[in-house]
Image: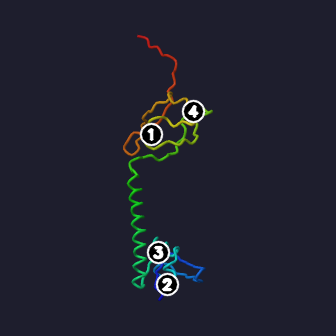
Amino acid sequence: MPFAVRNLEAGRAVFSDPTHNIALEWSGAGDIDGNDIQQVPDELAQNVNFLRAVQKGIFAVEEADEAIRAALDKQTTSWRRKSDEAKEASAAVIDPEARNDLVQMECVGPSQRAGVNCGTAVLVREKVIGEKPPLCERHKKLVNEYVMTQTDKIVDGKAETKWVRAVQGAREFQQV
């Protein structure tokens, strides 16, 4: 006896089983003509690919014999439990406070033109921004020549900071 299966996806769904000469098509979930529910032959209850589609939540069995419903529910429950455990395990590892993202910044090293920074793209971990100047491979040897300074500009309630190259100038004398 065939059983009723509903498509839970927003778009059309197609399933075929060439060995049993079965090809079925469902309209998207919530179809106003009711074509999101199709009668499916019992042979599909034994089809591994169809069972996977049910387990993944693509299809839901609406009406079926108790034996078919029990077998499908057992497999679906097992798959969902494993899926939920995997989600919980991966969520436990993720630390939202880690701030370990890569951020692209411009190199603050000197350029060929006076008063202009190099500007080469440099990847810096978000959590270490401000610990050392963002310098490209060509300028990384200058790391000890840079100091962090505050500007007069206020951003988000804090004084903006920037890296400036400290240069040693001529000694100035003052008469007393």
**As shown in the figure, which amino acid type bears the numbered disc 3?**
Val
Task: Say which label, 3 or 1, has the lower sequence index.
Answer: 3
> Spatial distance from mark 3 to mark 1, Cα to Cα?
46 Å
Residue 69: percent from left, percent from top: 41, 80
**As shown in the figure, which amino acid type bears the numbered disc 1?**
Val
Residue occupying the far right of the picture: 112
Q: Which one is in front, 5 or 125?
A: 5
Task: Say which label, 4 or 1, has the lower sequence index.
Answer: 1
> Spatial distance from mark 4 to mark 2, Cα to Cα?
70 Å
The answer to whether mark 4 and mark 1 are in CB contact below 8 A is: no
> Spatial distance from mark 1 to mark 2, Cα to Cα?
60 Å
Residue visible at 46% across and 84% down?
A: 4
**As shown in the figure, which amino acid type bears the numbered disc 2?**
Asp
Residue visible at 55% across and 82% down?
A: 24
Residue 58: percent from left, percent from top: 48, 74
Residue that label 4 marks: 139
**As shown in the figure, which amino acid type bears the numbered disc 4?**
His
Task: Say which label, 1 or 2, has the lower sequence index.
Answer: 2
* Mark 1 surroundings: few (<14), some (14-19) or many (≥20) residues within 10 A: few
Residue that label 3 marks: 54
The answer to whether mark 3 and mark 1 are in CB contact below 8 A is: no
Helix, strand or loop at disc 1? helix
Residue that label 1 marks: 128
